[in-house]
Image (spheres, rainbow, N blue to C red):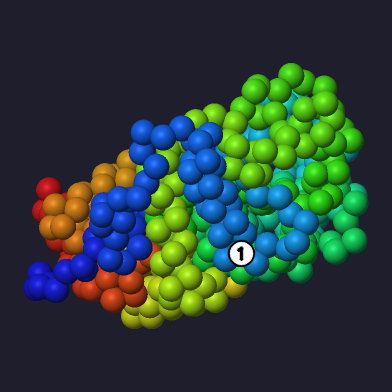
Amino acid sequence: MTKPQRKPNNPHFSSGPCAKRPGWSPDTLRDAAIGRSHRSKTGKQKLQEVIDRSAALLGMPTGWKLGILPGSDTGAFEAAMWSLLGERGVDIFAWESFGEGWASDAEKQLKLKDLRIYRAGYGDLPDLKQADWSRDVVFTWNGTTSGVRVPDGGWIAADRSGLALCDATSAVFAMALPWDRLDVVTWSWQKALGGEGAHGMLALSPRAVERLESYKPAWPLPKIFRLTKGGKLIDGIFRGETINTPSMLCAEDMLDALNWSASIGGLKELVARSARNLAAVEAWVAKTPWVDFLAATPEIRSSTSICLKITDSWFEAQSPDAQAASVKSLVSLLEKEGVACDIGAYRDAPPGLRLWGGATVETSDLEALFPWLDWAYGEVKKEKAAA
């Protein structure tokens, strides 16, 4: 086909760090508390504002605690696992790379004795009905590397005695979370709102706080994972007094993202924008013979980390290494043309494409990208076939 002429205004479709909000520029950081201590009055006020505005935007229930932790979503979720698990049996649900990481840490690092791991391959979900809610249950809400999400919170028991620990980093601010069915929720700044890296958020329900104050793990805790002191929650963490030094530039950037979110209509519009992006991809996939969703069924398709597999018989006939090389050529060609950056599948996932569909991505940019995907695939197929 003829090379398209119209290009996306923003070629950034990476699944993390994600696209900045529309209209962003470095000038938005002009009020950052640069050169100031994060423990100064100004520094703490800005960090507290990130916490308060995030909680308000998400509709977090009264009584929950929200804090900023080091190490991105990974640091926040590890802190929760190391601090909370071991009091009772644990069920872990894993269907992609990050869920497998939590399962590996529970098994090989924490060495939990009463541990059950339920797995599914890329594109599928484990049977969620296997969860025993008298136990603690660990899961990702949205599999960032597989494009597979849990369909809703109906599988989580309202009368659970165990805790629901949810890694929600590529779901929060793009999907509605049932807070009454969750106890621990974590995410990072660089995902759904396009913030900068290295900072994680940890949200704790009153039940999770009660566990922290009544249970002491058998293993030693690194300083950056310690959420209690003397058997009591370190409340300062949840008032902007971070465990280690945060970036005030990143904090200012996050405040800008929260301001933008509020200006467009809050969480409802963030979710709607992401849903529109998924709908646009669905419409393109429906008329495109060489591509399909990696997710097995529509109800588990992610609206943020939209993962696609190549179904063309020419591609499927190649060896796995040749498939990976073809995708690499496709992705490189699109980046060279300046129309899409960083859209290859995650390294552990099947060879394919991954498009971020969160609210900071404009649907019009995705629609401008689709003809380029068709063109680039045709170019790679022609080149490889002639070799």
Farthest top residue?
220
Q: Callout 1 environment at 10 Å: few (<14), some (14 to 19), or many (20+)?
A: few
Q: Position of residue 277 (x, y in %)?
A: 40, 73
- How many badges with numbers are in the image? 1
Location of the N terminus (image quadrant): bottom left
Farthest front residue?
41
Above or below, 20 relative to 167? below
Above or below, 160 relative to 287? above
Q: In the depicted view, which residue is nearer to us: 224 or 35? A: 35
- Residue drawn at 77 percent across, 52 percent down: 205
- Residue drawn at 65 percent across, 49 percent down: 66
Q: In the depicted view, which residue is nearer to us: 189 or 234? A: 234
The reply to whether residue 122 is visible in this rendering is no
Q: Position of residue 220 (x, y in %)?
A: 74, 19
Q: Secondary structure at mark 1?
A: helix
> Is 178 left, or right, of 342 in this rendering?
right
> Would you identify the image quadrant in which residue 5 lies?
bottom left
Disc 1 marks which residue? 56
Q: Position of residue 166 (x, y in %)?
A: 67, 51
User: Which amino acid type corresponds to the residue marked 1 in the rendered image?
Assistant: Ala
Q: In the depicted view, which residue is nearer to us: 166 or 90? A: 166
> Is 66 left, or right, of 312 in this rendering?
right
Q: Position of residue 381 (x, y in %)?
A: 19, 59
The reply to whether residue 137 is visible in this rendering is yes
Q: In the depicted view, which residue is nearer to us: 363 or 244? A: 244
> Would you identify the image quadrant in which residue 124 lies?
bottom right
- Residue drawn at 81 percent across, 51 percent down: 206
